[in-house]
Image: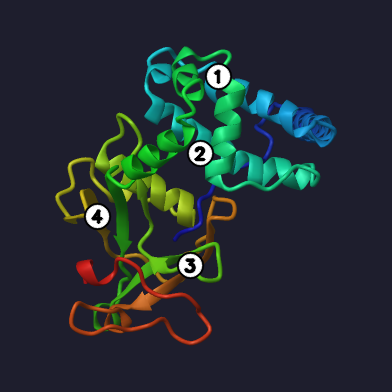
Amino acid sequence: MGVIRGPSLAPVAGSSATASTSKSAATSSAASTAQSTYNDAAYAYASLTFQEVLEDLSSRFIVNLPAEELSSIERICFQVEQAHWFYEDFLRPINPSLPSQGLRRFSGSLLQASAQTVPLIQQYTSGGALDAVFDDFMRYKTRVPVCGIVLLNTTWDKASCLLVKGWKSSSAWGFPKGKINQSESERDCAVREMLEETGFNCDELLPGNSAEYMELTMREQRIRLYIVPGIEEETRFETLTRKEISKIAWFKLSDLPTWKKQKEPAAGLGGKFYLISPFV
């Protein structure tokens, strides 16, 4: 990718260099303020008990949602999942005394903490049905459409595509993709997931009405992958996520598995391929 050049910082004729100095000082001050705010927040969380953290997360992620969101237990559960990521990725490193919890156990804890304020949740906590709510949510998630992008290089005689590997050592390699958000188009979901997982913004490379995609349905879940060719392999990729993507790499199409021929990633890359052969 070419270097993006900004406007010149040379003083305009008749102006004073003091403006540049003031801007620099303001920027430094803003950065200092932001760091101070983060430090204050980190200090506050470092002294909270688990129950106090649950009450804070309940307020941040659930209680103050719009009324239409609070009328759907599925939408509430998506917020619980977001809160769980925030808890494990940000709060526990700040406060190591907080217990690590899987999504099921954490969901029960946070929903219990939110039940006093959200009438819909009370219906499930009073009947002891939180486990059933979690199981239904996990089944619901598997039916949410998934969108992503197959990024291709510029060399057709050595055609390659970009794959990402999950965070755990046992995670598989797959195309950048993820579940579509409410009211989000398939195309926008694909662009967002590519940006989040690889740091690459292909918004200008993928037309809003693009018909260049592959699509299939597996176990009631629709998967759509858009094709974006012509990307230089020297392009720098860096995930914007935390503890979700561990590696990003180019793979030759000839090295990928197909329905007729199964293959594994090269030694040293770890993991296996996931949902590759249906699209190759």
- The quarter of the rendered structure image containing the C terminus is bottom left
Give residue 108's position: percent from left, percent from top.
55, 34
Q: Earlier in the sequence, mark 2 or mark 3?
A: 2
Q: Nearer the viewer, residue 26 or 277?
A: 277
Residue depicted at x 37% and y 22%: 72
Q: Secondary structure at mark 3?
A: loop
- Mark 2 to mark 3: distance in Å? 20 Å
Q: Earlier in the sequence, mark 4 or mark 2?
A: 2
Residue at position x 29%, y 49% in the image: 147
Q: Secondary structure at mark 4?
A: strand
What's under tag 2, amino acid-wise? Glu
**Category of crowding for the residue at label 4, using alpha-carbon neighbours closer than 10 angstroms: few (below 14), some (14–19), many (at least 20):** many
| Secondary structure type for disc 1 | loop
> Tag 3: residue type?
Ser
Depth check: give the residue in front, 209 or 217: 217
CA gap between label 1 and label 4 equals 41 Å
Q: Which residue is mark 1?
A: 115
Answer above or below: position of 217 versus 10: below
Closer-to-camera residue (42/85): 85
Q: Residue visible at 27% across and 49% down?
A: 206
Residue denoted by label 2 = 81
Q: Which residue does the numbered mark 3 point to in the structure image?
A: 171
Which disc is residue 12 wearing? none
Q: Are marks 2 and 1 in contact (CB under 8 Å)?
A: no
Amino acid carrying label 1: it is Ala
Residues under labels 3 and 4: Cα distance?
A: 23 Å
Q: Which residue is labeled 4 in the image?
A: 226
